[in-house]
């Protein structure tokens, strides 16, 4: 077995250490501009033009090495930020990012704010602040933790209790259990009505045409109830696709106007060639001085114009025919009257008066 010299071992260790330092040390002629709030690094150094010509493994390797060096510089700047343990001493190390310096454009429009409900408006007017309460409370009767509201809540349902107190001033012969059940049904109906009104208010705020208000008296027409049901159905995340239907509710066909459909956007990561072709086509249309001719629209416009001219000509002919008919009727009536007068004059005897026809007695 050959002897290993100590100098060779130390030299190999120094080379490994230098290689490790070289992997985290990047030298640039111009320093990068960093925006740590957006995790952004801008490299102003021009890339080597000779290595980027053409397409091949050399070009890919050069781009990969350039991206790796810039990422290394960005990570090194992130490690210089003040950091702390998130969630306690044993949690992960998290750094506090500064405020972003660049305002990046949004790919999608910001969401519209939800209109406040009537309770939120009343609470804002009265200065009522929302306090978060725990959902579980201690039930003294059941001797266990139960929900504050809902099924099997703490205290139980008063309508299901075995004993009901008669209020002061109430009729002693009245069934208190029936009264409690009736009040519960009224509360449920009132809450459902408020929920539908909030949905209708939100639907009116999202559309340009204001919808008809809901009547709180319960005398809604069939159209109003159908509209409320439609609004409540599409208020889910799936736009009513998985919502169960009522027993006698008809299946509504899909609307052609696009109502109730979600807006679709192009994916962030996809076919770059298709996106480039769309942008170039848009720029070509914007830069060209020739107007864009829509053949379908032009043909439809011509057809509508011809139909309108034909309808106008047909209406004009009908009006002329009507005038001719009225003239002929008037002429026929006048001729009939003149003929009747002539017949009366011919039937009258000559000599004038009524006594001329009498014969004198000898």
Image (tube, grey):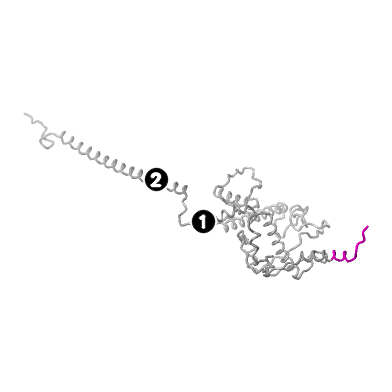
Instruction: Establish if 217 lies above or below 359.
Output: below
Q: Answer whether labels 2 and 1 touch (C-beta < 8 Å).
A: no
Q: Which residue is mark 1?
A: 284
As for residue 96 lying within the magenta part, the answer is no
Circle 2 packing at 10 Å, graded few (<14), some (14-19), many (20+), is few
Q: Is residue 123 above or below residue 251?
A: below
Of residues 86 and 281, the one nearer the viewer is 281
Query: Considering depth in this image, is 215 or 357 the residue closer to the camera?
Result: 215
Q: Is residue 8 magenta?
A: yes
State which region is magenta. 1-13
Residue 217 image-quadrant placement: bottom right
Residue 207: name its quadrant: bottom right
Name the image quarter holding the N terminus: bottom right
Residue 189 vertical position relative to residue 75 in the rendered view, above or below = above
* Residue 106 image position (x, y, % from top left): 62, 61
Q: Residue 45: image x %, image y %?
A: 65, 67
* Marks 2 and 1, how far apart at CA: 34 Å
SS state under label 2: helix
Place of residue 244 in the rendered image (x, y in percent of width and height, measured from the top left): 66, 46
């Amino acid at each position: 077995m050959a002897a290993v010299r100590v100098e060779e071992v130390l030299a190999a260790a120094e080379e490994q250490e230098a290689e490790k330092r070289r992997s985290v040390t990047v030298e640039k002629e111009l320093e990068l501009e960093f925006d740590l709030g957006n995790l952004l690094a801008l490299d102003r150094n021009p890339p080597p033009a000779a290595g980027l010509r053409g397409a091949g493994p050399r070009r890919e390797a050069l781009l990969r090495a350039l991206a790796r060096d810039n990422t290394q510089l960005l990570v090194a700047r992130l490690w210089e930020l003040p950091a702390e343990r998130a969630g306690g001493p044993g949690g992960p190390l998290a750094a506090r990012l500064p405020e972003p310096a660049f305002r990046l454009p949004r790919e999608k429009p910001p969401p519209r704010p939800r209109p406040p409900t009537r309770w939120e408006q009343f609470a804002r007017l009265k200065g009522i602040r929302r306090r978060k309460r725990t959902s579980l409370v201690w039930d003294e009767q059941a001797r266990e933790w139960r929900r504050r509201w809902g099924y099997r809540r703490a205290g139980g349902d008063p309508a299901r209790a075995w004993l009901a107190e008669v209020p002061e001033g109430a009729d002693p012969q009245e069934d208190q259990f029936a009264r409690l059940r009736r009040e519960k049904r009224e509360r449920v109906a009132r809450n459902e009505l408020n929920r539908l009104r909030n949905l209708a208010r939100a639907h009116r705020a999202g559309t340009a045409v204001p919808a008809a208000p809901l009547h709180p008296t319960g005398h809604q027409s069939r159209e109003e109830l159908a509209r409320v049901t439609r609004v409540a159905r599409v208020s889910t995340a799936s736009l009513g696709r998985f919502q169960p239907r009522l027993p006698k509710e008809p299946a509504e066909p899909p609307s052609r106007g696009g109502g109730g459909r979600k807006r679709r956007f192009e994916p962030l990561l996809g076919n770059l060639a298709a996106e480039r072709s769309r942008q170039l086509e848009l720029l070509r249309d914007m830069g060209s001085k020739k107007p864009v001719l829509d053949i379908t629209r032009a043909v439809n416009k011509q057809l509508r114009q011809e139909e309108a001219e034909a309808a106008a000509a047909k209406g004009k002919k009908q009006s002329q025919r009507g005038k001719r008919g009225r003239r002929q009727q008037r002429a026929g009536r006048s001729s009939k009257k003149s003929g009747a007068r002539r017949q009366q004059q011919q039937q009258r005897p000559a000599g004038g008066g009524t006594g001329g026809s009498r014969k004198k007695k000898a």
